[in-house]
Structures are given as C-alpha cells and as structure tokens.
Image: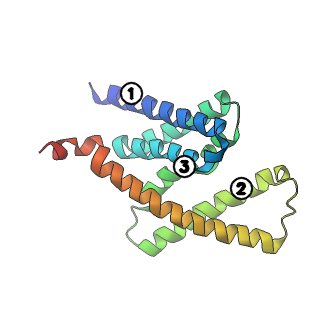
C-alpha cells in the first residue's frame, strides 16, 4: 500500500473510532468526560503515525461528524472545544525543550479553552451565577485536574508509541 493510501485509510479509521467513542459517550452520560478524553487518543494516534496535518484532519472530521450525526451534542462539543485538538497542541508544545515553558503553555491553552467554554455556555448553567470567588475556584480546580489529566495522557501516549505504534513494529519483531 502506498503512503497516500495508507494515510487516508488510517485517518478514516481513526476518525471513525473517535466518532464511535463519542457516540458511546453521548448515550452513556456517566462516562462522558472519560470517553471524550479517550476519543482524543485517536487524534494523538494520527499525529504519531502520520503527523500533525493528518491529526488535524482526524480532529476536524470527528468533530464535524460527531456534531452532525450524534443526537446528544455534549460529547462532540467537548471534543471540538478542547479534547480533540489538545493532542495536536500537546505534540507541538512538547517539542520545546524547556519543561517549565511547556507546562505554562499547556495551562494557558487549557485556561483559554475553559474561558471560551465558560462564556459560550454560561447561559446553559442555569442556577450558577458565577460570582468571582466561585469562578476562580473552578479555574484553579480545573487547572489541577488538567495537570493530572495531562500526566496520565502522556503515559497513555507513551504506551501507544512503545507497544502499538506502527513505527515500532520492526523493533518489536526483532
């Protein structure tokens, strides 16, 4: 199989798997955040196997198909507004050699995303008035949860690259 055909096939497969896990998240609301985060692993796999451009294609395809096809829009919206593009941003940020700058940029991306989500969907949060101390607590706790998420996400990506990735197939056979 030539490189272009392989790239299209893998992109379609990763997009379909991401939409499938978003579908499961939309019909199983107790697993919403975990399954949406799991969906983003398919974008990360596309970045690892084929590069950032194909990762962007998988993100856009899965986001659009999820929003258009799924009956419950919360899972695809979470995917489109943060979890879907985060693996792409993470791969770019982690090319920077300075760890403190990496963490600062990751937290900045998260907090900008949270701010956009907050102001976009504030009306949907019916009873929450959003007083300043409460909003600060939400952002601080969200940042702490995000740091734990990023640490675990890095472990999952490392597992994928070492055990599953096509690029390491030859090395595992030896």
For marks 1 and 2, the one nearer the N-term is: 1
Which residue is at a point 60% across and 51% down the rendered structure image?
82
Residue denoted by label 2: 116
In this rendering, the answer to whether 148 lies above or below 15 is below
Image position, residue 127 (x, y; %):
88, 57
Q: Earlier in the sequence, mark 1 or mark 3?
A: 1
Q: Nearer the viewer, mark 2 or mark 3?
A: 3
Quadrant containing the N terminus is: top left
Residue designated by label 1: 9
- Residue at 56% across, 49% down: 34
Number of other residues with Cα within 10 Å of mark 3, as a class: few under 14, some 14 to 19, many 20 or more? many
Do we see residue 84 in this rendering? no
- Label ID, residue 37: 3
Given contact means CB atoms under 8 Å apart, are the residues at marks 2 and 3 in contact? no
Instruction: Decide if residue 7 is on the left or right side of residue 64.
Output: left
Circles 1, 2 touching at the beta carbon (< 8 Å): no
């Amino acid at each position: 199989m030539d490189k272009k055909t392989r790239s299209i096939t893998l992109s379609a497969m990763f997009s379909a798997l991401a939409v499938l896990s978003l579908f499961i998240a939309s019909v199983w609301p107790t697993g919403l955040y975990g399954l949406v985060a799991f969906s983003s692993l398919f974008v990360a796999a596309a970045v690892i196997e084929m590069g950032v451009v194909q990762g962007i294609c998988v993100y856009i395809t899965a986001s659009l198909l999820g929003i258009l096809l799924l009956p419950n829009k919360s899972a695809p919206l979470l995917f489109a507004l943060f979890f879907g593009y985060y693996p792409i941003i993470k791969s770019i940020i982690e090319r920077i050699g300075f760890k403190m700058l990496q963490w600062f940029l990751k937290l900045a991306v998260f907090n900008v995303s949270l701010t956009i989500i907050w102001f976009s969907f504030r009306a949907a949060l019916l009873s929450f008035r959003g007083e300043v101390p409460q909003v600060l607590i939400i952002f601080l706790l969200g940042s702490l949860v995000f740091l734990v998420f990023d640490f675990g996400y890095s472990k999952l990506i490392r597992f994928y690259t070492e055990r599953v990735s096509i690029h390491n197939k030859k090395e595992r056979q030896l």
